[in-house]
Image: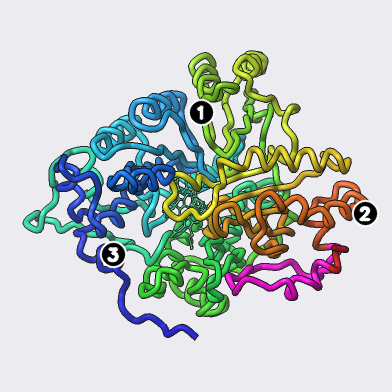
Amino acid sequence: MAKEKTDPTKVEIAKQNSELLRGSIDETLRNPELDCFKEDDLQLLKFHGSYQQDDRDLRKSRRAEGLGKAYSYMLRVVLPAGQLTAAQYIDLDRIADEFANHSIRLTTRQAVQFHGVIKGDLRETIRQINESLMTTLAACGDVCRNVMATAPPIQDAVHTKIRETAHAVAAELKPATQAYHEIWIDGQRQVTSQTATPETEPIYGETYLPRKYKVGVTVQGDNQIDIYSYDAGLIGVLENDQLIGWNVVAGGGLGMSHGRPNTFAQIAENIGFVAIEDGVAAMRVIATIYRDFGNRFDRKQARLKYLIDKMGVDQFRREFIDRCEFDVHPSRPIPEIQIEDWMGKHEQRDGKFFYGVFVENGRIKDTDDVKLRTAFLKIIKTLNCSTTLTPQQSILFNDLDESQIKELESILTEHNVPLLHELSNARRYSMACPSMPTCGLAVAESERVMPDFITEVENTLAELGVADTQLTIRMTGCPNGCARPYTADIALVGRRPGVYHLFVGGRLAGDRMADLYAADVKIESIIETLMPLLNKFAAERNPEEGLGDFYQRVLDRTESRKRVTGKEIPTYDDLQPKLIQIGA
Ligand code: SRM
Ligand code: SF4
């Protein structure tokens, strides 16, 4: 068994010494001789919304030429509940051209990323984002990340409260440091040790949280945001269609490491029920328990799920109740989850309409064939509509008159963007993480190979006569789980270039973990490996049954799996009983 670590990690020390996230970021920005940041500052930079990256496609050739890495920066823009005005979208589109790689990347947490920003443009890019009333502060780092909310812009009391609560949690848990404004906006230090009122971080303290803290807000029955995958969340409970309070959930998380048995992906547990007005405070209380007891000696064990695992859910619940200055009741039973991705035309319940458009892997760009970016900009400029980014990396155009829908669809068609009826279910519900060439942790391709892989799946399902199946297919370039693979019907998780672990058995509802179905499969052999299951599915599925549900039924599972561990790669013998059951 690995010895428990007892020294604070380098990141903890960097935070402690940073004077509330300042470090020497400003000095490095001012020095044109430097093309990258110091190690400690790289950690701090994340809290400001940026990762230093390099173009991994160029590493080899640059090394051969005796050159260093081609550094550039990823910038993430925080958008609570995924909401953007028309003017903000137009500004983001312009920024993509002026400072980034001409694409906008919608994320799995309803935020936006730019890739390829150079160091010399970082300050101006962040300044312009702020000028448009958006921020990159706390998009990354050991703080509360972008707060998600179920996406549809339905204008009733329940959905309005969900969105307001997501914004309120984001505001409550935003870092208080002035460092962000000093470095990126004002350009000079406002608060010094001589300032009359010393600067503090009232909730986080000087070392912030042990790791990232992810929160989502939704309403019962609607798990569009995959709420069980996060550190904490609020599920609105309804009585006679009125919101009466929140079921608080905690302890989800999908990151794990191959070959490390003590890392795991797991779905969140019910913690209790609180009144509507106490939801925001409940998310703050959980953050403070995490702040005080989370592991600061081993970042691989630092997420809240490991703390809850160590304490036990019951003790965690007791600690939560002790700290709450409001009543906590047992969680309320809630109905079975439904998933809606809100693509196509829907009513907002205020006489207006919204219209969802699928964005493949969240990448808004123009290609020779499909002018997605141009189409979206034209829609927004012509129809002056606000937008909501969905947790499935897609977009909703809001506040439309019914008469404008035809115009919107004709703009899409003009630019070769497929309409909903032209999309297969396999593609519509798919997601892939960015991976190569920008992600420093990628070990295999994801976003760049996913479209072709989906085409293969589409062809296979059509040949088997099951193309109507609603199934989620997700791919990531490493086990960190950024496209939430472990709750999908089928998932490919990168092991090394061209090779993936194949998971099966989750479902769209996001409330069940998939199984490792086959280890170390080359991408060209994935379909072949799935064929026994797909054949059996085509022959024996019940009407409306999804692939993950079918797989669980064939295995005769009485209880859904709540956790997948990063244990050693299973051998063929380990997998054999499972394969025999499905007829392989
Ligand atoms: Fe993620 C790290 C991209 C959602 C778990 N994630 C990264 C980094 C920053 C790589 C790095 O640390 O160097 C990736 C940047 C790549 C690039 O080039 O852009 C990255 N993660 C993404 C995004 C953009 C994927 C996407 O396809 O949209 C998502 C941005 C969300 C946002 O707007 O904030 C993204 N990441 C997720 C999710 C899904 C979610 O939250 O809904 C997860 C799984 C849930 C969870 O957190 O448990 C996730 N990302 C991770 C992890 C594993 C954390 C862990 O607990 O072990 C890492 C690695 C790390 O933090 O060290 C990571
Ligand atoms: Fe990078 Fe891995 Fe996340 Fe993909 S899953 S973006 S490869 S960290």
Number of residues whose C-alpha sits closer than 10 Å to that of mark 2, classed few (under 14), some (14–19) or many (20 or more): few
Q: Position of residue 59 (x, y in %)?
A: 38, 47
Is 554 magenta? The answer is yes
Q: Position of residue 44 (x, y in %)?
A: 28, 55
Residue 540 image label: 2
Residue 266 image label: none
Give the residue number, with chain letter if any, for mark 3: 205
How far apart, in angstroms, are the residues tagged by discs 3 and 2?
Answer: 57 Å
- At a point 60% along the width and 66% down the height, the residue shown is 266
Q: Position of residue 306 (x, y in %)?
A: 50, 72
Q: Residue furthest left?
A: 194
**Position of 283 relative to 298 (above/below):** above
Where does the magenta region start and end? 553-579
Residue type at mark 2: give it. Glu
Residue 365 image label: 1
Label located before the other in sequence (3 or 2): 3
**Position of 200 relative to 396 (above/below):** below
Residue type at mark 1: give it. Lys
Label located before the other in sequence (3 or 1): 3
